[in-house]
Amino acid sequence: RRVWDVLDRVPETGYEETVLLSDLDDVSWSFYRNGWVEFWPLANDPFSQSRLPRAVKFTLSFADGRTIDRIIMIDHQG
């Protein structure tokens, strides 16, 4: 993660860098509408071009074989 001490920075502005995760091998995403798919918006589907999926799932895979899965539900009423 990079953090700058100023709001309106120029290219020469320095930053502080922090590693948030180490030994991460892969990050994958899935999107749910009426089933899980790997890409959003769906190709050749005008409905998905203007709508959000119902949920987003991401999986973090680590070098030691561990995985972390998280599903984020999306509120469609707002």
Image: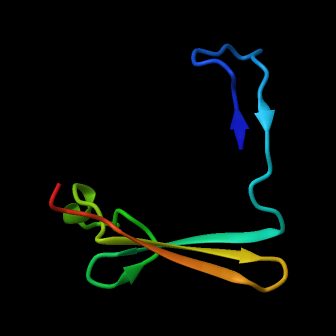
Please state the horizontal and vertical placement of residue 71, each as a whole percent of the image.
45, 75
In the displayed structure, does residue 45 sit left or right of residue 73? left
Q: Quadrant of the N terminus?
A: top right
In the displayed structure, does residue 51 sit left or right of residue 13? left
In the image, residue 18 sits, relative to residue 41, either above or below, namely above
Figure label count: 0
In the displayed structure, does residue 38 sit left or right of residue 35? right
**Colouring chosen for the image of the structure:** rainbow
Please state the horizontal and vertical placement of residue 65, each as a whole percent of the image.
79, 86
Residue at the spot 26% in from the left edge and 57% down from the top edge: 49
State which quadrant residue 25 falls in: bottom right
Residue at the spot 69% in from the left edge and 22% down from the top edge: 5
In the image, residue 72 sits, relative to residue 17, either above or below, namely below
Near-viewer residue (70 or 37): 70
Please state the horizontal and vertical placement of residue 14, each as a whole percent of the image.
79, 21
Near-viewer residue (41 or 31): 31
Residue at the spot 28% in from the left edge and 76% down from the top edge: 33
Which residue ends up furthest to the left in the rendered image? 77
State which quadrant residue 44 falls in: bottom left
Which residue ends up furthest to the front in the rendered image? 5
State which quadrant residue 46 falls in: bottom left
Residue at the spot 17% in from the left edge and 54% down from the top edge: 78
